[in-house]
Image: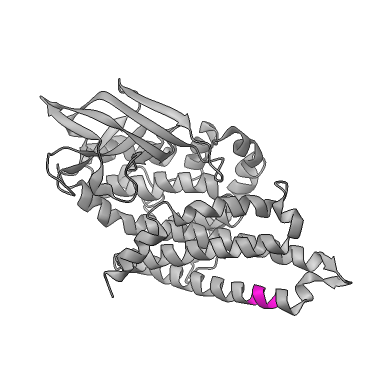
Amino acid sequence: MGRFTEETEEHAIFRESVRGFIRKEVDPFFRDWEEQGAVTRDLWRKAGSAGLLCPQVPEAYGGPGCSFKYNTMVIEEFTGKGFIGPVNNFSVHSDVCAGYLLSYGTEEQKKTWLPKMVSGETVCAIAMTEPGTGSDLQAVKTRAKQAGDHFVINGSKTFISNGQLADLVIVVAKTGNEDGAAGVSLILVESEREGFERGRNLDKIGHHSADTSELFFSDVKVPLSNLLGSEGSGFGALMSELPQERLTIAVASIGAAQHAFDITRMYMQERKAFGKPIIKFQANSHKMADLKADLSVGWAFVDQCIKQHERGELTPADASIAKLWCSELQGKLVDQCLQFFGGYGFMKEYEISRLFNDARVQRIYGGTSEIMRELISRYL
């Protein structure tokens, strides 16, 4: 069983299937993917066959029609083994992109794309961030001008998860001339469209097995039917879907933090100094006790948020609190855990060094910690 409450026998069966998939299809190849800068395309198809992609998609669109808890179990199991890079890209596809299609897609769009996303035949990305625009989504410069029965898209995006492998990209673009949020729309762009280009796979300090790219749009023509939702409604859609994205980041952060804690505890029980395990020194054990307490609080709050989300009651404030608390905890915890490893923690051959690097971006993407504090403060 996982660390979330009220799990049924069906949950346990699914959780064990995820663990089996990780043992067979992820663990033996993870180091190779870290060196290559991306997972193989074959992993996406295997994940689809195993039912790990888009579990919340209804049967009418080729999915199993599970509750969102199944999505979080995939994240928890991957991060619980230290594989946060690949599952974060899976999460963008399953928990973010699929959510936009389910909430705002036409019947034709859902029937066209969701079955392929469930199977892993189609990999999806969402292109929000631009070179000069981070958390301020109202300031996007990418434009989609209507020309007859098409949109013509020009602009560029950066830091796009799944950018190297994506077959379908949800592009955030301005379709109107209004300033601010007005005029922001979401448009589906297939990767084979003329004028669409992928830039380099960005060289990051962590998440090396998760491809992250620049994307360029030069007079890319797409039919008006590729509009996702109504024209000018994009910013509202982004605001309504971001709480779910932030919740999944919280799940990934707390899962990865727990894994770092677990491997550190084992190391401290084995590593001896002055004739006894280093965990027996009070200064060390008390620091671990503090981390254990923080983890317990984090798990409980995220569990509460998942239940609220499944009831349609998760507020933007609570999602922001979960993302802020868990990502900040992950950063603090891996830093302290690396310290317990001493000089070995600074060696790349030790897993804790990778977990340290992987943790850093969690406080940035999905809305920085500073933005989370700003959002929370609005509900005081």
Q: Does the stretch in magenta take in 364? A: no
Which range of residues does the magenta coloring cover? 285-289
Q: Nearer the viewer, residue 289 or 148?
A: 289
Task: Assign the C terminus to one quadrant of the image.
Answer: bottom left
Q: Nearer the viewer, residue 124 or 269?
A: 269
The answer to whether 213 appears left or right of 138 in the picture is: right
The residue at the point 77 percent across, 76 percent down is 281
User: Where on the picture, by quarter, is residue 108?
Assistant: top left
Q: Nearer the viewer, residue 221 or 325?
A: 325
Which residue of the protein is positioned furthest toward the right in this rendering? Answer: 275
The answer to whether 346 appears left or right of 58 in the picture is: right
Main SS, magenta region, reads helix
Give coordinates of residue 73: x percent, y percent.
49, 58
> In the rendered picture of this protein, how many numbered marks are placed on residues?
0
Colour theme: one colour
Q: Is residue 12 visible?
A: no
